[in-house]
Amino acid sequence: MIFRPAIRLGLLFALVAGASGLHPASAAHAAIGTPVANAEMPLIEGGKAYALKEAEANVLVFFRPKQERSLEALRELAQCQVGFSGKSVHWAAVVSASAPAGEVTAIMRDTGFAAPVLVDNGDALYSSLGLALHPVVVLVGKDKTLAAFEPFRSVEFCTIVGARIRHALGELSDAELRNVLSPPTATQGGSEQVARRYRAFAEALFKDQKYDKALENVRKSLDKDPRLAPAHALLGSILTTQGNCAEAIPAFNKALEIDAASSSAREGLARCKAGH
Amino acid sequence: MTTVRGALYILLVLGISISSLAQSPAPAAAAVQAQAKKAPAVAASRKPAPGTLAPLPAKPTPASSHAPFEAGDCKICHQSADPKQPGPVVKTGPALCLECHEEFAGVLKRPHTHAPARADCTSCHNPHNANYRKLQLQEPRTMCSNCHDKIGKIVSKATVPHKAVTGGAQCTACHNPHGSAVEKLLVQLPFDLCMSCHNVDTMTDAKGRKLQNLKAWLDKNKNWHGPVAAKDCSSCHEPHGGDHFRLLKADYPQEFYAPYDPRAYELCFSCHQEAAFSTAQTSTLTSFRNGSTNLHFLHLQQSGRGRTCRACHEVHASKQDNHIREGVPYGSGGWMLKLHFKKTATGGSCEKTCHSEKTYVNKAAR
């Protein structure tokens, strides 16, 4: 009985997958770095294939037909695959032997996800990796160990799976991967931006020779952001035009203190000192 | 005069190119201007109606006003300084606005941008003044629903509303209507967004019932459920509003005991295999088994008194593996029934809980 194929396969997977000393099912999945056995498995259309190929990244996609999330995941991954065409990435889909072949074939066709479909007899591979849900992408590195585990998510699935693969290919650094997994907050506005707007408004007024209004708005800009060098330089320019170099010079100096490369401040300062 | 000005505003809305003063646009503005030309045109039916962008009367006082308009400086945007006949704008599309609102050049280069923002800022903003904050033509929920009508219907028909959507900043509480690094124009990944509000002890739902301080819970309980670890709260929760308890997307049993019915676990089975709970004998579908006797099956499918998931599992996070909870509220007196779960080298045990100590073995001892 112990030599029935499914149990034998499961033992083979468990033998290697349990090498870390932790039972894979005791966590949400086997620990990252767990060796993944490369067994020969039946294909849905007949014949056999090994689960893993000699590639920089093996991407195993465990799914269930007739599951809404699997449908969404495979559709997204079909688009994702395009970006890895020609690269050392092997994609394979994995289904339980209990899944009706017709339904499996249909979902693969409908989603356009291009990969051989491996039949996981007795859910041996699924179990050996400690999986407890579908759909999930399991990434195996070129050293045949578990590199990443990504269940489907409704936002940024392809972006994150793609980043994991690129990281495995050496195309993405650790820091870049972290940036993808935790993208920056999409903020806008804030005091600094308001300051820039007032400065831009003041500049437009200055060009239109409305000096008092320009002065009023450039001071509003500096209230919001006292470190905005262009605003200090503009203040100096407005004051110079009004014939007030006494106050313009400190403004130019402040601009240069913040930004030594400010050409408008340097030129304005030179004009004032030359008595213009 | 009014007719002429009205006609000019119609021309502005339709985006007809009018010869403008020769000004070299700033490089960023030029790039965005080029992008706006390539962006799909906002459907004519979804553009502001003619006259919508005209200045509102001074009384009642508009909620927001554009600084150049308020200062009477029409020439900042128009060809003429005459407020009665300012003439056409000096540039079309976002390029004009970017002359001052320069930060949006960067925003509109983010990976995900909003088509109306790429096409024309006046899709959503009145450039003079408005009855809503930030010069918006309407309140966000109404304005967004003009295009996103399906979401609008979900929000308005939800029997369990989400206060983040129905009040305050509404859609813009979670979405950046200009551009974002995250899909669906989310300001952050779902989890980070949700935690920015669900991090207090005082939050209540729409019916006034207290909600858990989820951030505090997750800080204390490090074994996170998959969707939580994946930062995908929307795997289980409908963020716009829904018809299930706690904005869940599908059914999840609220009771401690319930006869087994897979329909009651629709939410869980959207990810987990139903077979893992309905197969009496298995050595692969679950690790909660004694040999090949499936203990999930045993617990869930007891005749007349099946335990539901919440009897043993935390849905968000726990201190113990497999999201086993330390205790479960039992009865109306607030007593906590401790689970006393212990993991062992070969499986685990539960004692002095619903039953006396029982041990299970799911692998051979080494």
Image (cartoon, coloured by chain):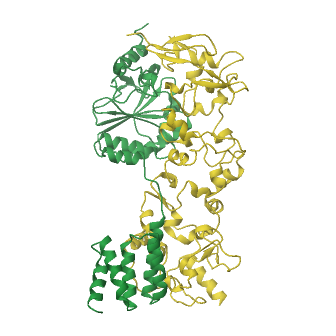
Chain colours: A green, B yellow
As drawn, is B160 to the left or to the right of B295? right
Q: Residue, x 63% and y 49% (percent of image)?
A: B240
* Up-down relation of residue B345 to residue B246 (above or below): above
Residue drawn at x 62%, y 16% is B353
Task: Please tell me which residue lies in front, A250 or B53.
Answer: A250
Percent across and percent down for residue A251 are 36, 79
Left or right of B129, for residue A218: left
| Residue B354, visible in the rendered structure | yes
x and y, in percent, of residue B270 in the image: 57, 34
Residue A164, image quadrant: top left
Residue A56, position as x, y percentages in the image: 28, 37
How many numbered discs?
A: 0
Question: At 48% across and 19% down in the image, what residue appears?
Answer: B284
The location of residue B92, given as percent across then percent down, is 49, 77
Residue at left offset 52%, top offset 71%: B120
- Asked if one can make out residue B101 in the rendered structure from this viewpoint, the answer is no
Q: Nearer the viewer, residue A193 or A157?
A: A193
